[in-house]
Amino acid sequence: MTNPVAQAAMLLKEHRESIDRLDAILVYTLGERFKHTQAVGKLKAEHDLPPSDPSREAAQIARLEDLAKEADLDPDFAKAFLNFIIQEVIRHHRKHQE
């Protein structure tokens, strides 16, 4: 018979390894996303476009909320997360315009 504590420790280790892999995926995905938003910021600055696009941002938030529901993720958390990213992107876009 397997020791329940040892089995729990093994399961904990497996979950943590999965979490670590997913954290790496998140970081690399965000890095790739910001490469594209930096390019958008440069284009906006070159063509004297505003750093923020409220209609695009609203559409993205609604889209992410739907995706979150499909993924069984709290839509309020997903919305807050995307709002944080959008504010960071706008900050970068403003820097390009300076």
Image (cartoon, helix red, strand yellow):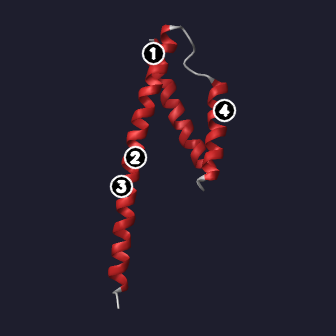
Q: Are marks 3 and 1 in contact (CB under 8 Å)?
A: no
Q: What residue would you read off at disc 2?
A: 25
Q: What residue would you read off at disc 1?
A: 42
The circle drawn on residue 59 is 4
Q: CA distance from mark 4 to mark 3?
A: 31 Å
On the image, the x and y values in percent for residue 38 come to 44, 23
> Mark 2 or mark 1, which has the lower sequence index?
2
Q: Residues within 10 Å of mark 4 (few under 14, many from 20)?
A: few
Q: Secondary structure at mark 4?
A: helix
Q: Quadrant of the C terminus?
A: top left
> Mark 3 or mark 2, which has the lower sequence index?
3
Left or right, residue 96 beside residue 73: left
The circle drawn on residue 91 is none
Q: Secondary structure at mark 3?
A: helix
Residue visible at 51% across and 25% down in the picture = 90
Q: What residue would you read off at disc 3?
A: 20
**Amino acid found under the numbered disc labelled 3:** Asp
> Mark 1 or mark 4, which has the lower sequence index?
1
Given residues 85 and 63, the one toward you in this image is 63
On the image, the x and y values in percent for residue 84 come to 52, 37
**Amino acid found under the numbered disc labelled 4:** Ala
Q: Residues within 10 Å of mark 3 (few under 14, many from 20)?
A: few
> Mark 3 or mark 1, which has the lower sequence index?
3
Left or right, residue 46 beside residue 8: right
Given residues 28 and 76, the one toward you in this image is 28
Residue visible at 35% across and 55% down in the picture = 20
**Amino acid found under the numbered disc labelled 2:** Ile
